[in-house]
């Protein structure tokens, strides 16, 4: 399951088990160079880089091709019955090459928001998140405190029932005291159930009705603890300090659909870009 692409609206993910013929996942750096009269170069770059994906398949099975066509043309329907999801919102893409689905800055424990509100929230107890001298944030915990990791767009990281998810808490938490948990949620963000374990990591299987998962953890002791080195992964063992590659919301910017010589198979290509929202 982990090595295939999953794509679709949250709650309506579909597995594409045919390997893409071409697959480009290069981040867009947007670095601008300025050269002075003396020949010195100065560069200007945005604080964040966005991810672009370019995928193409030859002789794709009809069901998969139709799914991608619906996504590109925004005719996938209103999402899950009873949810607020629409066919015009961003797509979820679970990239099989990504080891750590946390945001890159989140995995490295770097935040530009007061109290780390862009990446973390207090699940139980009290915690104070503050900057550290080594360019990462630290958290002052009570012994009963648990914090959750926040996805920047949705109620959690997109999953589908039956999907195996593994979660590793920050690297400097004591495994003898720590608690790791996965909170499963429905498509409208409502709490569904929890999979928890004593120790540094936990693995759970998304239950029926699950559309999102939120990783949560507690160090089990009061005091200052770092938040770097956590890892959320699909179907594989998590790796401490793995580069966070994110699970960004994406939108289709280009699409082609060419009938194959072996009808009803079709050759399909998609270009996608990371977005904070996608409107009609």
Image: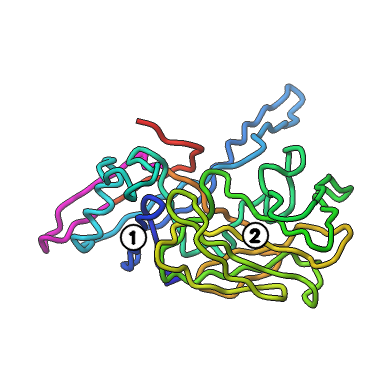
| Residue 72 horizontal/vertical position (percent) | 30, 44
Query: Of 52 and 31, which appears nearest the observer?
Result: 52
Q: Nearer the viewer, mark 2 or mark 1?
A: 1
Q: Height in image: 4 above or below 51? A: below
Q: Is residue 160 left or right of residue 137?
A: left
The quarter holding residue 102 reads bottom right
Residue at screen point 33% across, 63% down: 16
Task: Answer whether residue 256 is magenta in the image.
Answer: yes
| Residue 103 horizontal/vertical position (percent) | 61, 51
Query: Of 10 and 111, which appears nearest the observer?
Result: 10
Per the rendered image, the range of residues in magenta is: 251-268
Residue at screen point 62% across, 68% down: 167
**Residue indicated by mark 1:** 14
Q: Quadrant of the N terminus?
A: bottom left
Query: Of 36 and 84, which appears nearest the observer?
Result: 84
| Residue 243 horizontal/vertical position (percent) | 65, 59
Magenta stretch: dominant secondary structure: strand
Colour mapping: rainbow
Label 2 SS: loop
Label 1 SS: strand
Query: Of 11 and 265, which appears nearest the observer?
Result: 11
Classify mark 2: residues with Cα within 10 Å, few (<14), some (14-19) or many (20+): many
Q: Quadrant of the C terminus?
A: top left
| Residue 237 horizontal/vertical position (percent) | 59, 75
Task: Evaluate if marks 2 and 1 touch, with contact meaning CB atoms under 8 Å apart.
Answer: no
Classify mark 1: residues with Cα within 10 Å, few (<14), some (14-19) or many (20+): some
Inter-mark Cα distance, 2 to 1:
26 Å
Q: Residue 243: which disc? A: 2
> Mark 2 or 1 closer to N-term?
1
């Amino acid at each position: 399951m982990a090595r295939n692409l999953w794509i679709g609206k949250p709650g309506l993910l579909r597995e594409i088990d045919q390997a893409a013929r071409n697959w480009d996942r290069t981040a867009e750096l947007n670095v601008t160079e300025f050269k002075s009269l003396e020949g010195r170069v100065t560069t200007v770059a945005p604080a964040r880089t966005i991810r672009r994906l370019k995928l193409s398949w030859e002789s794709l099975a009809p069901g998969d091709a139709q799914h991608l066509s619906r996504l590109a043309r925004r005719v996938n329907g209103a999402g899950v019955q009873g949810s607020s999801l629409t066919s015009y919102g961003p797509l979820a893409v679970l990239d099989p090459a990504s080891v750590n689905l946390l945001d890159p800055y989140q995995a490295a424990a770097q935040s530009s928001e007061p109290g780390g509100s862009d990446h973390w929230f207090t699940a139980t107890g009290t915690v104070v998140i503050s900057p550290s001298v080594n360019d990462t944030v630290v958290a002052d915990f009570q012994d009963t405190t648990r914090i959750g990791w926040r996805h920047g767009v949705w109620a959690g990281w997109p999953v589908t029932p039956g999907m195996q998810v593994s979660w590793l808490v920050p690297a400097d938490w004591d495994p003898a005291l720590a608690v790791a948990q996965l909170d499963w949620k429905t498509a409208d963000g409502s709490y569904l159930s929890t999979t928890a374990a004593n120790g540094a990591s936990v693995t759970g299987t998304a239950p029926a009705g699950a559309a999102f998962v939120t990783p949560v953890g507690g160090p089990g002791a009061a005091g200052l603890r770092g938040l770097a080195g956590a890892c959320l992964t699909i179907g594989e063992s998590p790796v401490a300090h793995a580069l966070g590659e994110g699970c960004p919301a994406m939108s289709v910017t280009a699409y082609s659909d060419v009938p194959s010589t072996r009808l009803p198979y079709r050759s399909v290509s998609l270009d996608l870009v990371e977005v904070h929202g996608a409107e009609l």
